[in-house]
Amino acid sequence: MASAERTQEILKGLREAVVAYDEEAAARLSKAALAEGVSAYDAVRQGLAAGMEKVGEMFAKHEYFVPEVLLCSDALYAGLDILRPHIRAGDASEVRKQIVLGTVEGDVHDIGKNLVKIMFEAAGWLVHDLGTDVKLEKFAEEQARTNADIVGLSALMTSTMLAMPRVIQMIKARSPGAAVMVGGAPLSPEIARQYGADGYARNAGEAVREAVNMLSRLGTKG
Ligand code: B1M
């Protein structure tokens, strides 16, 4: 069992490895965490995910750009692949929320959507990624199939975002309790409200926090 000091050292190392997109260090420290009895759950949440959260903030401040963020996510996954099988069901139940995520019909932009996915996975959510150019009715179908807490819609074009109100109506008609979050460069909090969305996130760094806030605002789950 690692001492409290050693545990903090490993967690700090994991955060730094993600920020420095150092895959080797992320893998090595993840193995060290397991070997020395640090909880896999803490290593993901307070190590890898916290590092990725920092990366999200750096991206929002234009300190990192897409290539760096993708490299950081490689480091995140290098650690996640090692730690994930060791997260006990009891640990995960607290955070095992689910999101259905996709880019709406007619739109193939997925770089931002994939960054959002990474942040949710890093936070322990189960992500049902529908990909891009997703048929409008597919979002409601997948939400009903999985009973996901949230549906996340991404659009990068002013033409494709126009489909969002219809998608939201379909989801709400089928599952009134499901919450819908929208995002993507042409969206804004005002447009999200007009469209009937429950939440909006400006970037991947804010998405998980907004999702959790949204659920507690709605008082349904979370
Ligand atoms: Co296209 N494209 N593109 N494109 N493309 C834009 C979006 C555009 C603004 C370029 C321009 O004209 N200046 C423009 C849209 C104009 C408009 O409608 N306002 C445009 C166009 C017109 C097109 C085509 C029609 C071009 C053509 O063929 N004539 C075509 C459309 C194809 C289609 O979708 N049917 C097209 C194609 C492409 C490529 C395939 C070449 C490529 C996409 C590759 C891919 O995604 N796999 C591409 C790219 C790369 C871009 C730009 C250059 C970059 C987009 C990007 O990845 N940004 C873009 C111009 C630009 O933005 N400078 C442009 C980086 C990414 C990290 O940011 O996606 O905003 P972003 O995601 C952020 C936030 O928005 C937010 O978090 C993310 C991370 O922080 N976010 C969410 C996103 N989704 C979220 C969901 C959430 C929460 C937050 O909750 C669910």
Image: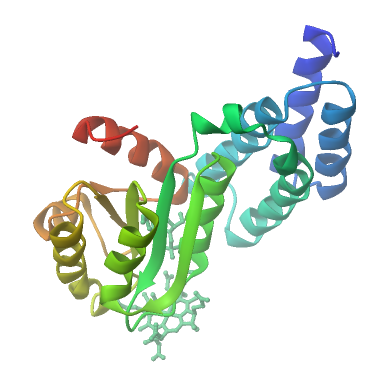
Disc tally is: 0
Residue at horizontal 59 percent and vertical 27 percent from the top: 91
**163 to 168, vertically: above or below:** below
The residue lying toward the viewer, choosing from 29 and 22, is: 29
The residue lying toward the viewer, choosing from 210 and 179, is: 179
Q: Position of residue 37 (x, y in %)?
A: 83, 21
Q: Position of residue 116 (x, y in %)?
A: 48, 54
Q: Position of residue 45 (x, y in %)?
A: 61, 31
The quadrant holding residue 27 is top right
- Coloring scheme of the render? rainbow
Q: Where is ligand 1, by quadrant? A: bottom left
Residue at horizontal 58 percent and vertical 27 percent from the top: 90
In this rendering, does residue 184 appear at all? no
Residue at horizontal 35 percent and vertical 41 percent from the top: 211
Task: Report the side of 31 relative to 38 (left or right).
Answer: right
**43 to 102, vertically: above or below:** above
Q: Residue furthest bottom?
A: 106
**175 to 35, vertically: above or below:** below
